Amino acid sequence: MRLALRLARKGEGCVSPNPMVGAVIVRDGRIIAEGYHRRCGGNHAEINAIENATEPIVGATVYITLEPCSHYGRTPPCVDALIACRPGRVVIGTTDPNPTVSGKGIQALERHGIETRVGVLAEACRQMNEVFFKYIRTGSPYVTVKFAQTLDGRIATATGHSRWISSSPSLRFVHRLRSVHDAILVGSGTVLNDDPELTCRLVRGRNPLRIVCDSQLRSSPQARIFNEGKGSRTIAATTRRAPIERRRLYEAKGIEVLETEEDKAGRVDLRELLTALGKREISSLLVEGGAAIITTFLKEKLADRLIVILAPKIAGEGLNAVGDLGIRQMDDALRLSFRQVSRRGDDLILDALLNRNSPER
């Protein structure tokens, strides 16, 4: 199963909105086949493993990180192909959260007399597909908020200068992070101040869909983020407050304008935007700033994961990474569960999940 997990990871950034899945087929302690889901619309892991088998699968043991599908989607049901091969046993990491699948693939195997075991390395299998699990259960993308800050919590100096807080190795890490997300989001302030490209030019991988939250379309349609030549589309998310002449400038350049209702502050309603992205099969979203956008995602409890790049620098007065969250008592502070602390160059990378519930006292 550990090998199947490693194989599954090879599909990261290529299979969305499907899950990453790996499969290994074993006979008498020998691995006779391996497979993983390579891309959305392509064969699933089980089918690739079956096709890669070096000998008949009858009586062998099949290890799969996720319950085999039992319905027709982009591909035929994998469980039917497994049953036809007559393995002696199937070991499954975790059940599929999709209601059209959950438990049905397991039941089909058992009905045909195939010994089935579920729950091997279940937590690791679920964690690997945390994006898929949330997307399937809620219809909304899994949201990662990322920012780089100095040791004293600044994302820019008092003059607004921010290039570069983090090191070159951290920048490559960020480009890799972008490449495994379906979409990346920033606010209009970031576009106006930094004119970023938000591409993955430093690593191999696809460029994500780029989204600019701009309630009045203040950004220039000529900004680099709207350059379609970078192999990535860009959406301008706005509100009815955006002047019609500004909309026409965007539309004349072929930029999609997506209107949402206004939130209480008169800005793009992020909950509505997330719902709209989910309907477009955007299962993962990387939020890169600026401070107002970061603050809103945290305040409205819309973020699932937080990645902070902590640079060994002190800036003194400057722009805070996170603004007012309305928290007045320390007991009400947002709580995090650190998953990993790593190092890139001189920087620390803090990777944490946001806890929805307060711990017991």
Image: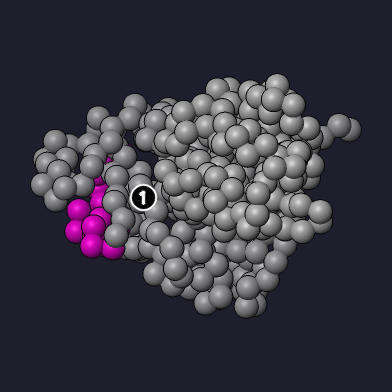
Image quadrant where one finds the C terminus? top right
From the image, give the main secondary structure of the stretch colored magenta.
loop
Was residue 225 drawn as part of the magenta stretch in this picture?
A: yes
Q: How is the image coloured?
A: one colour
The residue drawn where x is 67% and y is 37% is 86
> Does residue 345 appear in this view?
yes
Q: Position of residue 321 (x, y in %)?
A: 55, 55
Q: Position of residue 342 (x, y in %)?
A: 70, 66
The residue drawn where x is 29% and y is 50% is 234
Foreground pick, 271 / 293: 271
Foreground pick, 265 / 232: 232
The residue drawn where x is 47% and y is 41% is 17
Q: Position of residue 155 (x, y in %)?
A: 52, 62
Left or right of 82 on screen, residue 179? left
> Does residue 318 appear in this view?
no
The residue identified by callout 1 is: 209
Name the element at disc 1. Answer: strand
Magenta segment: 215-230
